[in-house]
Structure formats: structure tokens, C-alpha cells
């Protein structure tokens, strides 16, 4: 039995690795537009290559299940065509015994795929976002030489005293739009300077507005005088893009996702006790999105095992009889999984429907595969 396990496992793994490599190369081309867009921002070649490598975990969770299906299909087809399966069964081993080592390997591949989609892909997603933010960082002291950029972003910058392009400016005036109030904020400084990652100011006066809460159009102004002002360059870049950092579910690893779910449930209970109906409903939708994300990762994680069982169960008949009917079954069931997956991924506000779509294809594929294996054992097909 160990010899049989090593023989079947080695053939399955070789086909699996080769197919995964092929699919990664093919699928990475689908993300070339995003890679090319990143390259146009002017980063160094090292950063472009790093950004391209970060794209691999995006395609692996889909490439691995499809590769598992193809590897299992090729293996079962080859065993049937060369009559190796007949020889193995002549020793008293059942088809289930032949499939067991492959399914055990597929189980470990599923665990690996779950780790990739839940841990590695989230980390790479966050690093991609950080890389984009770093490349898009705007040097505030170079704004004076980029009149077109200032016009597009609605900014104003001028240095009334002496200045050194990109390094320092004296008696500087800087005006920018505020995101919350929609008004213009004014920053006046005796001196502005820039180091590697921080934006510094001396004798800074900041004038802004606070939105009125009484429904009137009049706003309250605030004036703040600061002797020494410092701001991270990355935060300044986000200000220029009128953006703020937000924690997306795609950035969270599974432990953090579970912790966030517990926190949201605690807040929901407090809102229900306070009878805040509208806020409680909004919080329920947030919890639903978290549950959908968890189920999505689980669904993608177990897909290699499900697809391997599909390829083994329906691949034997294809090699033995040359019938195309079973190949149609495989294509339809694999398409069912992909259609349900992408449909569920787009169902942002229907948690129950999305969870059902993530789980239903696995149940259907496993059930039909078990029925197929039982018929093969009984010789009825």
C-alpha cells in the first residue's frame, strides 16, 4: 500500500505543480493592466517587480483548485487508458482505495490554499496598497513647480520668502480643500522644510472651519498657532488625494477578521439594548459582510479537495470509454462553482444568499462524485 500511495501521489503532485505554474503565468497576464498602471507612476524597477510578485497570491486561490481538477482528471484518465486501474483492482483494492492517497494530498493542498487566501493574499493586498501610496507621495515643496497638479487638486501654494526647490520654503502660504466641511483651509508658516519622510513647519498658523450642527450655512472658524509642526509625508499625500486610510476586510487575516466579528456583535447587542433600530440594522449588514468574507475564504480553501474528487470520479469513465458526456458533467459542475462564487462575491447586501452560493456547489459536487464512485464500484457505469 505505501508503494501505491507514493506512486499515485507523485504523479498527481507533478501534474498539479506543472498546471499551477501554467495557470499562474496565464492568469497573471490578466493583471498586467494594473501592473502597467503602477509602472507609469515612475517607481524603480525593484518596486515594479515586487508589485508584480504581490499579484501572484491574487490568482493562486483560483489557479490551485482548477489545477487540482486538471491533475486529478489527467491521472484518472491515464490510469484507465493504460489499464493500470484494472491491474490495481485485480489485487483486491477498490476504487476508493486508489483515490484515498490523492484525496489525502488534496486535503493538504486545500489547507495550503486556505492559508494563501486568508493570510498570504491579505498581506500582499495590504502591501500593494502601501506601495501605491508610497509611489504616489507628493512632495509639498515641489507643488510650486507643478501648477497643473495644483489646479487639478484645487490647491494653492506660494513662498513669499527665499526657498529651495523640494527642500525648504520661507513665508509660505498653502491652501487646500477640507474633506469634511467642503471649505478651504489655510496654512501659513514662517518656514517649511522636508526630510526623508516628514513635512515640518515653524511658526505655523492653521485656519479651518467646523461644520455647523444647527442646520444653518454659517460655519465656525478655528485658528491654531503652532510653534513646531510636523506631519508624515504619507499623510500629506493622502490629504492631496482627498483620501484617508480605511481598514478593508480584504486586509484582515482570519484571526483579526474573527476578532472584528466579535467586536461588531458586541456593538450590535449594545445598540439593540438601546433600541437604536436604524444603527442596529446597519451593524447587522456589517456583520453579514464579515460572515460572507469568512465563508468566501472557506469556500475557496476547500475547493482543491472538491475539484480533485470531481476529477477522479468523472475522469475514469472518460479514459475507459472515450465518452464525452462525463467531460460535459465536469465542465458544468466546475462552471457552477465559478458562477456561484462570483455571484456571491457581488452580493454585498444579501449575506444569507451569498453564504448559500458559497456552500451549495461544494455539496452538489461532492454528492454527485460519491454517487459516481459508488456506481463505478458496482460496475453499473
Image (tube, rainbow, N blue to C red):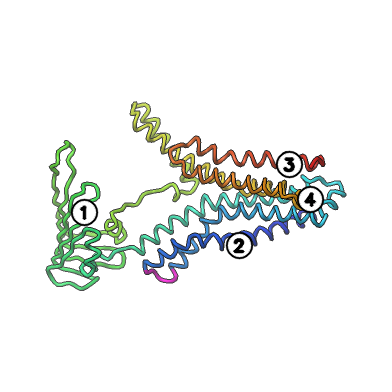
Dot 1 or dot 4: first in sequence order is 1
Q: CA distance from mark 3 to mark 4?
A: 15 Å
What residue did someone put label 1 on?
177
Magenta stretch: includes residue 44 = yes
Dot 3 or dot 2: first in sequence order is 2
What residue did someone put label 4 on?
321
Query: Which labelled disc corresponds to residue 372?
Result: 3
Place residue 348 in its image quadrant.
top left
Which mark is in front, 1 or 3?
3
CA neighbours of label 1 inside 10 A, class few (<14), some (14 to 19), many (20+): some
Dot 1 or dot 3: first in sequence order is 1
Q: CA distance from mark 1 to mark 4?
A: 71 Å
Q: Main secondary structure of the magenta part?
A: loop
Regarding mark 1 in the picture, which secondary structure is present there? strand
Magenta stretch: includes residue 2 = no
Q: Of 200 and 244, which appears nearest the observer?
A: 244
User: Relative to 222, does residue 363 appear above or below in the rendering?
Assistant: above
Regarding mark 4 in the picture, which secondary structure is present there? helix
Q: CA distance from mark 3 to mark 2?
A: 29 Å
What residue did someone put label 2 on?
22
Residue located at (38% from left, 32% from top): 281
Which mark is in front, 3 or 4?
4
Instruction: Tell me whether the residue at label 1 lies in contact with that at label 3, contact meaning CB atoms closer than 8 angstroms.
Output: no
Q: Of 142 and 318, which appears nearest the observer?
A: 318
Dot 2 or dot 4: first in sequence order is 2
User: Looking at the picture, how far across and down is residue 236, in whole percent?
Assistant: 27, 59
Which mark is in front, 2 or 4?
4
User: Relative to 189, does residue 254 appear above or below in the rendering?
Assistant: above
Amino acid at each position: 500500500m505505501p508503494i501505491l500511495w507514493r506512486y499515485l501521489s507523485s504523479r498527481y503532485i507533478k501534474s498539479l505543480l506543472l498546471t499551477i505554474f501554467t495557470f499562474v503565468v496565464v492568469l497573471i497576464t490578466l493583471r498586467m493592466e494594473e501592473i502597467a498602471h503602477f509602472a507609469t507612476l515612475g517607481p524603480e524597477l525593484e518596486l515594479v517587480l515586487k508589485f508584480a510578485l504581490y499579484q501572484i497570491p491574487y490568482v493562486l486561490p483560483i489557479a490551485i483548485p482548477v489545477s487540482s481538477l486538471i491533475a486529478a482528471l489527467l491521472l484518472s484518465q491515464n490510469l484507465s487508458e493504460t489499464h493500470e486501474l484494472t491491474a490495481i483492482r485485480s489485487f483486491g483494492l477498490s476504487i476508493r482505495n486508489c483515490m484515498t492517497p490523492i484525496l489525502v494530498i488534496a486535503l493538504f493542498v486545500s489547507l495550503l490554499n486556505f492559508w494563501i487566501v486568508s493570510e498570504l493574499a491579505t498581506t500582499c493586498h495590504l502591501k500593494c496598497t502601501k506601495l501605491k501610496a508610497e509611489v504616489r507621495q507628493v512632495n509639498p515643496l515641489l507643488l510650486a513647480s507643478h501648477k497643473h497638479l495644483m489646479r487639478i487638486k484645487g490647491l494653492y501654494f506660494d513662498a513669499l520668502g527665499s526657498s529651495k526647490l523640494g527642500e525648504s520654503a520661507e513665508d509660505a502660504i498653502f491652501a487646500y480643500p477640507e474633506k469634511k466641511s467642503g471649505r478651504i483651509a489655510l496654512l501659513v508658516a514662517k518656514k517649511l522644510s522636508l526630510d526623508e519622510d516628514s513635512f515640518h513647519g515653524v511658526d505655523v498658523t492653521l485656519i479651518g472651519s467646523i461644520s455647523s450642527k444647527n442646520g444653518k450655512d454659517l460655519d465656525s472658524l478655528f485658528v491654531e498657532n503652532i510653534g513646531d509642526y510636523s506631519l508624515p509625508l504619507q499623510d500629506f499625500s493622502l490629504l492631496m488625494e482627498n483620501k484617508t486610510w480605511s481598514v478593508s476586510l480584504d486586509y484582515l487575516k482570519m484571526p483579526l477578521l474573527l476578532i472584528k466579528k466579535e467586536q461588531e456583535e458586541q456593538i450590535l447587542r449594545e445598540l439593540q439594548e438601546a433600541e437604536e433600530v436604524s444603527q442596529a440594522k446597519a451593524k447587522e449588514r456589517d456583520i453579514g459582510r464579515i460572515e460572507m468574507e469568512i465563508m468566501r475564504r472557506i469556500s475557496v480553501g476547500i475547493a482543491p479537495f472538491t475539484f480533485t474528487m470531481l476529477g477522479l470520479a468523472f475522469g475514469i469513465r472518460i479514459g475507459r470509454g472515450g465518452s464525452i458526456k462525463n467531460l460535459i458533467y465536469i465542465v458544468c459542475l466546475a462552471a457552477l462553482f465559478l458562477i456561484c462564487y462570483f455571484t456571491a462575491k457581488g452580493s454585498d447586501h444579501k449575506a444569507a444568499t451569498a453564504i448559500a452560493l458559497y456552500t451549495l456547489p461544494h455539496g452538489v459536487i461532492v454528492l454527485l462524485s460519491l454517487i459516481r464512485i459508488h456506481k463505478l464500484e458496482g460496475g453499473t457505469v
